[in-house]
Image (tube, helix red, strand yellow):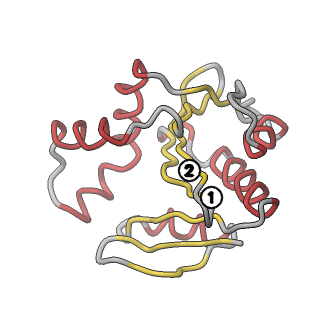
Amino acid sequence: MGARVAVALIGSSSWETSLARAGVELRAATRADLDFAAAALEASMRAFVEAAYGAWNAAEQRVLFARSFDLTSHRIVRCDDADAGVLAVESRVHCLYLARLFLLPRFQRRGIGTRIVRALLESARARPCPLELSVLRTNPAAFRFYELLGFRVVGETPTHWLLEAE
């Protein structure tokens, strides 16, 4: 945890301010980040997507990802002066929704994700509203990660657990 995780704040979201205090650096995503973001998705999620849906089709995954790469909600997570992952958070009427949190494998298990989720939980509690997300059933490590941070299952689909923390 000795590495400094850098964050250039964009907007004035309270969770982004909390992240800055926690030493996590974010920057606004741009269209130029699409290749990096798609690579982060593949590096961190490919095995789980394949287990849930079958063989990874890179072209299809790229098209699906590009369609949902909304610049208003996506941030690039930075650590050690390098792009480390992708974060997407949506402020919805009834909740704060963690749409994406992908960290490249070399940046996982360093406390970065924990700091991000804790800042989001703090912000959701201040609103007050729940923080919601979904996790692939084929990714039990992610499920345990969120469970340890206080999330509980509030629904499910054939492929996902729907989680919430208040």
Q: CA distance from mark 1 to mark 2?
A: 6 Å
Q: Which mark is residue 90?
A: 2
* Structural crowding at the residue carrying mark 2, measured as other residues with C-alpha within 10 Å and reported as few (<14), some (14–19) or many (≥20): some
Task: Pick out the residue farthest to the front.
Answer: 93
Q: Residue at x 75, y 29 (%)?
A: 4
Quadrant in which residue 48 is drawn: bottom left
User: Looking at the picture, how far across and down is residue 63, in whole percent?
Assistant: 22, 38
Q: Amino acid at mark 2?
A: Glu
Residue at the image position 25 percent from the left and 65 percent from the top: 52
Local secondary structure at mark 2: strand
Quarter of the N terminus within the rendering: top right
Residue 42 badge: none
Relative image position of residue 94 (x, y in whole percent): 61, 66
Using the image as rendered, state which of residue 39 and residue 16 is in the foreground.
16
Nearer the observer, 5 or 121: 121
The spot of residue 145 in percent (x, y) is: 59, 64
Q: Identify the element where label 1 is drawn.
A: strand
Residue type, numbered disc 1? Leu
Residue 23 lies left or right of residue 59; in this view the side is right
Relative height, residue 40 to residue 7 (above, below): below
**34 or 113: which is nearer to us?**
34
Residue at horizontal 79%, vertical 34%? Answer: 20
How far across and how far down the image is residue 8, in percent?
70, 24
Give the crowd class for mark 1: few <14, some 14-19, many >=20 residues within 10 Å. many
Q: Does label 1 or label 2 sit earlier along the sequence?
A: 2
Say which residue appears at 25% left-offset and 43% top-offset. Answer: 64
Quick one: 18 or 13, which is closer to the camera? 13
Q: Which mark is residue 96?
A: 1
Residues at marks 1 and 2 touching, judged by CB atoms closer than 8 Å: yes
Q: Tell how many labels.
A: 2
